[in-house]
Amino acid sequence: MPAHLYPLLETARLRMAATDVHHAPFILELLNTPKWLQYIGDRGVYDVAAAEAYIRERMRPQYDRLGFANYTLARQSDGELIGCCGLYERQGLEIVDLGFALLPQYEGQGYAREAAARLLELAFGPLQMPQVAAITSEGNEASQGLLKRLGFVFDRIRFLPNDPEPVRYYLVSPAQFRQAATAG
């Protein structure tokens, strides 16, 4: 797949740009929100320089190699950066994983579902993926609920490499996603 195939995606309310170093101040803020730290983990990103390095070393290589990865979400209405959503090749998972996170003030407004649905459309459309996975921490009930509304089905508890905490592992097929989309 050619690199940079999907630099910008859009939905009715969101502009989804492939995360790059100019997003570093925002990524610094997002990675240090209470829910990120609780449910995703401390990435050791405590200043803008560390955020730039995190983007260059952890986010951009996958995008440059596959043409998709992490997207920074901005509202169409005012350009305000609100979160991120992506499709990830994750160590310890056999298939591509969907992930999302929002700043606290933008949660509960349907933005994560809108962004995640757009990425699933990409995954099951042009990218022709047969399935997409997702993982959540055991206590992250909000994310688990969103995954279910997107058609994901709980598969099992898993452990990822270098992580002592178990995660809930979900899967969704194109048919499951389409059925969930038509159900509302």
Image (cartoon, helix red, strand yellow):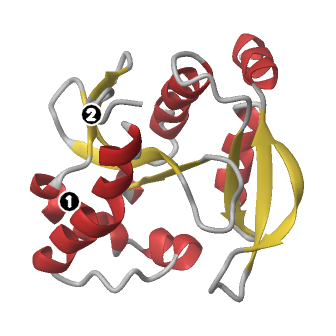
Q: Is residue 79 above or below residue 180?
A: below
Name the residue rendered at 19%, 41% in the picture: 80
Residue 70 at least partly seen: no
The answer to which image quadrant residue 147 occupies is top right
Residue 12 at least partly seen: yes
Name the residue rendered at 65%, 29% in the picture: 129
Q: Earlier in the sequence, mark 1 or mark 2?
A: 2
Q: Amino acid at mark 1?
A: Phe
Q: Amino acid at mark 2?
A: His
- Estimate how packed mark 2 is, as few (under 14), some (14 to 19) or many (20 or more) residues with alpha carbons within 10 Å: some
- Estimate how packed mark 1 is, as few (under 14), some (14 to 19) or many (20 or more) residues with alpha carbons within 10 Å: some
For the C terminus, the quadrant is: top right
For residue 142, which numbered disc appears in the image?
none
For residue 26, which numbered disc appears in the image?
1
For the N terminus, the quadrant is: top left
In the rendering, at what x and y percent does residue 17 appear? 25, 36
Task: From the image, tell me which residue sits under label 2.
Answer: 4
Name the residue rendered at 47%, 48% in the picture: 107
The answer to which image quadrant residue 15 occupies is top left
Instruction: Left or right? Give the position of 50 relative to 129.
Output: left
